[in-house]
Image (spheres, rainbow, N blue to C red):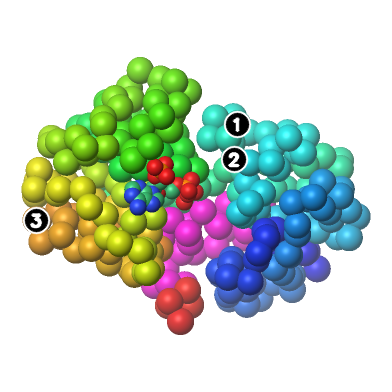
Amino acid sequence: HPLAGVIGWPIAHSRSPSLHGHWLQRYGITGYYVPLPVMPEHLAEVLRVMPRMGFVGANVTIPHKESVLALADVVTDRAALIGAANTLIFRADGKIHADNTDGYGFIANIRQHAPDWRPEQGPAALIGAGGAARAVVASLLESGVPELRIANRTRIRAEQIKAEFGAKLVVYDWAEAGNMIEGATTVVNATSMGMEGKPPLRVPLDALSPGTLATDLVYTPLITPFLAEAQARGCQIVDGLGMLLHQAAPGFERWFGQRPEVDAALREVLLA
Ligand code: ATR
């Protein structure tokens, strides 16, 4: 009976237990996926003990995604590049393997809902430069975007990403974020703006052209003000919920031995 879970502090609001629980039930797997509230000062101790308790792996969420890198024995290249991990595998030889599947989830979501998307055909514009944006940068570069423009309220965070990810990045000033969108064929909101209870993204969107792919990492609400305006301007839109669903799939497959499906039924579980 394989055992997995999600480690965070706090953890009560995590959607991962219902997501993995749904898959366990759907595939008739006798395993468990539990929420694990772990304080930062206890993370190292907990990670050492979990394999001995029968855990085969875990997801990692706020505030542990960065600190877990130093505690893992093997860190994948993409997790190292992003500077954070969200998926751990406790290997049979006792070693902790840390990976980041957020970028995979980001791309898989777009590919599922916009199968005609061709990232290599034009520049991408990314609004935001926080932790989530770094996974988006890594995956967009891997997908072959010819140019990746980035603007962030705090400019230095965008400069930092450019310093780490290289020449295809072009940093725009926050005040120029509207201009950055001109000619972009992929536009991504990776800020928390537009989330329920927060003000909407205040970047001018008149440069959005029909046919552009617009996607948001925010999924509460599902259709953010940014996505609604993009759709009104003729863009193809992809909401952010699927990124959460897809990033969970590789871990589930590794731990429980079944590649899970991301479909409408799963979306309903998360929206309930
Ligand atoms: P996450 O892991 O979700 O990316 P984060 O690292 O705190 O969280 O990043 C949040 C992002 O939203 C950042 O790009 C942040 O901009 P700053 O780097 O300037 O903080 C952006 N953000 C949050 N609130 C914002 C606001 N009111 N105006 C503009 N950007 C905002």
Mark 3 lies on residue: 233
On the rendered structure, is 184 left or right of 102?
Answer: left
CA separation, marks 2 and 1? 7 Å
Instruction: Look at the picture and state if 263 lies above or below 126.
Output: below
Q: Nearer the viewer, residue 174 or 215?
A: 174
* Disc 1 residue lies near ligand 1 with CB under 8 A: no
Q: Which residue is mark 2?
A: 84
Q: Position of residue 8 (x, y in %)?
A: 67, 59
Residue farthest top in this picture: 167
Amino acid carrying mark 1 in the image: Ala
Tell me how far mark 3 sits from mark 1, CA to CA. 38 Å
Could you tell me the amino acid type at mark 2?
Ala
Query: Residue at point 68% right, 60% down?
Result: 9
**Residue picked out by circle 1:** 80
Dominant secondary structure, magenta: helix
> SS of the residue at dot 2?
loop
Q: From the viewer's perspective, is residue 186 above or below residue 111?
A: above
Badge 3 vs badge 1, beta-carbon distance below 8 Å: no
112 within the magenta span? no
Quarter of the figure with residue 265: bottom left
Residue 129 relative to residue 6: left or right: left
What segment carries the magenta color?
A: 242-267
Q: Residue at x 35, y 17 (%)?
A: 167
Which residue is pictured at 48% across the width and 23% down the height? Answer: 164
Q: Position of residue 151 (x, y in %)?
A: 30, 36
Total numbered labels placed on residues in the image: 3
Residue at (86, 60) in percent of width and height: 54
Task: Work out whether mark 3 precedes mark 2 in sequence or the reverse, and give the earlier one.
Answer: 2
**Which amino acid type corresponds to the residue marked 3 in the rendered image?**
Arg
